[in-house]
Image: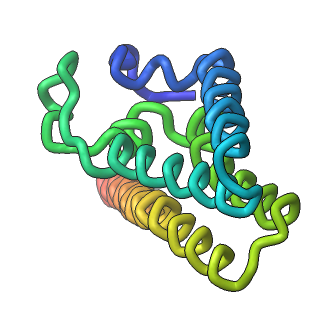
Amino acid sequence: MTCEAYISPNVEWSLEPSTWLGQTLLTGTVLFILTQIFSKPTAWSLTICLYNVITFVFFHAILGDPFKPEYSGLTFWEQLMIQLKGSSGMSFFTLFPVMLFLCGARLAGFSNFFFLVNFLSLVLVVTPKIYVYALHYRKTQQEKKKKVNVQKRKRSAQRVDN
């Protein structure tokens, strides 16, 4: 799952399914409370926007890792990408806001205004994730090409020596 022998506790908790359950239950509780106060579309919109803003700040705005100083200049999402390359936790944190948006759009029957607001908040939270995925993918592809080139050079050098 990862190339590293040590996964920082700052990142390790994201692998726990209990984290996913807790996040789902907390989001559902917020939605339930807001539906008691506001109309259904407003409650869904507030829940989606709150979730997206909070996770944007947590994953993409706060820098550092108190357990591994070499990650002090990276966002939490970049730390996840480096330490947990393609883990189930990353998939959950990428897909949950999308599923929340789709459920809200279907169950609340958003008007054009609510749809636009929720879609923009979804774009706000998903775009940085996709950007980091793309950067990491490009970096790993370049590293693979370098390894292949080094191996080719070694083989050609061995052929010349023989």
Q: Classify residue 119 by image quadrant.
A: bottom right
Q: Nearer the viewer, residue 149 or 119?
A: 119
Residue at 35% over, 41% down: 58
Where in the figure is residue 74, as x and y percent of width and height?
22, 44
Q: Is residue 88 above or below residue 9?
A: below
Residue found at the very far front of the displayed protein = 37
Numbered label tally = 0
Residue found at the very far bottom of the displayed protein = 112
Asked if residue 155 lies left or right of residue 16, the reply is left
The quadrant of the picture occupied by the N terminus is: top right
Where in the figure is residue 137, as x and y percent of width and height?
47, 60
Whether residue 159 is visible, yes or no, is no
Q: Is residue 63 above or below residue 17?
A: below
Q: Is residue 31 above or below residue 103?
A: above
Q: Nearer the viewer, residue 158 or 154?
A: 154
Where in the figure is residue 117, as x and y percent of width and height?
56, 74
Q: Classify residue 110 by image quadrant.
A: bottom right
Residue at 22% over, 27% down: 65
Residue at 39% over, 15% down: 5
- The way the protein has been coloured in the rendering is rainbow
Residue at 65% over, 74% down: 114
Whether residue 92 is visible, yes or no, is yes
Asked if residue 60 lies left or right of residue 31, the reply is left
Q: Classify residue 63 by image quadrant.
A: top left
Q: Nearer the viewer, residue 89 or 124?
A: 124
